[in-house]
Image (tube, rainbow, N blue to C red):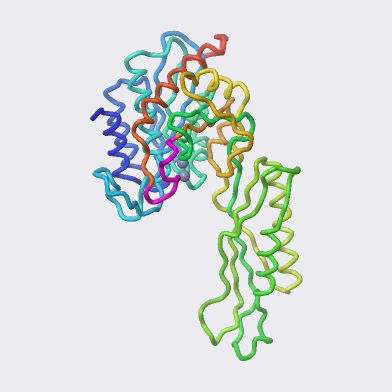
Amino acid sequence: MNAIVSLRRQLHANPELAGHESETARTLVDFFRPLLPDEIIGGLGGHGLAITFSGQAPGPAILLRCELDALPIQETNDVSHRSRFDGVSHKCGHDGHMAILAAVGAALAKRRPARGRVILLFQPAEETGEGAAGVMRDSRFAEMRPDFCFALHNLPGYPLGEVILRAGTFACGSRGMCVRLTGKTAHAAQPESGISPAGAMCRIIDGLAGLQAGGSGETAFVTIAGARLGEKAFGTAPGHAAIWATLRAEKDETMRELVTLSERIVHEAAADAGITGSIEYEDVFPATVNALDAVEIVRASAAPLPVREMERPFRWSEDFGRFARVAPSALFGIGAGETVPDLHNPDYDFPDDLISIAAELYMRIIVRACESRGTSPEEKR
Ligand SMILES: [Zn+2]
Ligand SMILES: [Zn+2]
């Protein structure tokens, strides 16, 4: 078996959750060290790694990003490289994305870019939406000053190797809203002496689920992810409730509108019921908005792979969107095959055949991106 495929399977067998990817990072450093990259930076935003291969001449810095983390899902596959850990597995294909960048690194070690440099970024904690922000808070990331950032995500349901593009929003922004309602607990025989949040909770759930925002045809909606009222205690009239909802929008400005409308529903329902309502957010992902010139580089590099242009953004979220604030960026999809189980499903496994297809695409992207910018005096190796 080729070394890259066996690396992919080793990563698959040893998955680690967001924020805990220390062994994954160590495995990658062990893989890359013999390739003699110009720099290996560890501990980025947690267990993140940046591995740089510099060219012969100064030129642009091209950043390729993949993810380190696995998911809290029990694997149901019975393959020899199945997850060794109960309840944790690579069900988003991040093992495959890492293997793709490993293959790119192996190719760059044999043949350096003509000019500029390539930064292979292994980002931690993508699934929680914390990793990209963590990496970008590190001053060592600021010094990298990429001129372009690219990332791909494998997409089951599309033909193997098909390149899936969209300029503008590629993936929606989303955020988890945690609502806490506090009334007053009472004896179930005297509910009138307490204040139950039940009515406000129902009103909020109905209100959030029906919310609309943004322009017509724009993706913007709220999903009720869960709710809880009191406890299973028949002697008690509840005084507490919680609602968890996911807000989703294709534009960050529409997300702000959705947040304002959602918070108004919560506060009005709580005030009318004479209870307090508080709101916190988790898993915050900005919309991933692709730059035209970065998408054009991917489009022009795709051949011989077929290209599909998406009319609508994907509804799921990706924290790669944060890199768009640093440099022209593009996240694109690459088909994982039409019969592959969906992402985050317990029987999903990244298709090994996609590794070399995607790595070769990245090599074409690197060549084109390096050519796309002239060498200005401040450009650096
Ligand atoms: Zn995922
Ligand atoms: Zn993913």
Q: Quadrant of residue 211?
A: bottom right
Q: Residue 75 location, x and y as percent?
A: 34, 51
Height in image: 325 above or below 349? above
The prevailing secondary structure element of the residues shown in magenta is loop
In-front residue for pair 364/102? 364
The residue that appears at 40% across and 39% down in the rendered structure is 94
Residue 147 seen anywhere in this rendered image of the structure: no
Give the image location of residue 189, x and y in percent: 61, 91
Asked whether 346 falls inside the magenta stretch, the response is: yes
- Quadrant in which the N terminus is drawn: top left
Q: Quadrant of residue 266?
A: bottom right
Looking at this view, is 196 or 367 the one in front? 367
From the viewer's perspective, is 374 left or right of 5?
right
Q: Give the magenta-colored segment's residue range.
A: 336-347
Q: Position of residue 25 (x, y in %)?
A: 34, 37
Furthest toward the bottom, the residue is: 189
For the point 44% across and 34% down, the residue is 66
Residue 309 seen anywhere in this rendered image of the structure: yes
Horizontal arrangement in the rendering, residue 66 relative to residue 80 (left or right) = right
